[in-house]
Image: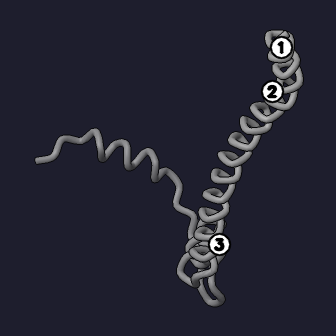
Amino acid sequence: MPVAALVLVALLYYRPARTYLSTRDTVSERSAEVRALRAHKRALEDRVERTAADEELARQARRLGLVKPGERLFIVKGIGAWRRARAERPVP
């Protein structure tokens, strides 16, 4: 009779225990995901702060080919080839 009672108790606790363990694993996974998303958010906020600075904004505009009023835009071609040739040339 005590064995039957023990088996009954084990059967009654099986499903809640399994659900608890499954939920614990899910919470652990979600916590890791939240940490990663928070780190990504901090990186994006830092990027926004840097971009909001006037220097960074001007640098990004220049990369896009924008110029300030009164300036002239000059397009110089062949810089990559010039750099490669210069890098291959022996230093005296």
Relative to 76, does residue 55 appear above or below in the rendering? below
SS assignment at label 3:
helix
Q: Nearer the viewer, mark 1 or mark 3?
A: 1
Residue lying at 53% horizontally and 55% vertically, measured from the top left: 77
Query: Badges 2 and 1: C-beta atoms under 8 Å apart?
Result: no
Q: Nearer the viewer, mark 2 or mark 3?
A: 2
SS assignment at label 1:
helix
> In the drawing, does residue 9 fall left or right of residue 40?
right
Position in image of residue 65 (x %, y %): 64, 68
Nearer to the camera, 37 or 87: 37
Q: Which mark is residue 48?
A: 3
Position in image of residue 73 (x %, y %): 60, 74
Earlier in the chain: of badge 2 and badge 3, it is 2
Q: Residues within 10 Å of mark 1 (few under 14, many from 20)?
A: few
Earlier in the chain: of badge 2 and badge 1, it is 1
What separation in Å lies between label 2 and label 1 (alpha carbons)?
16 Å
> In the drawing, does residue 10 fall left or right of residue 78?
right
What separation in Å lies between label 2 and label 3 (alpha carbons)?
45 Å
Earlier in the chain: of badge 1 and badge 3, it is 1
Residue lying at 80% horizontally and 13% vertically, measured from the top left: 2
Name the residue tied to disc 2: 18
The quadrant of the image that shows the N terminus is: top right
Position in image of residue 36 (x %, y %): 64, 50
Q: Residue furthest left?
A: 92
Name the residue tied to disc 1: 7
Identify residue type, mark 1. Answer: Val
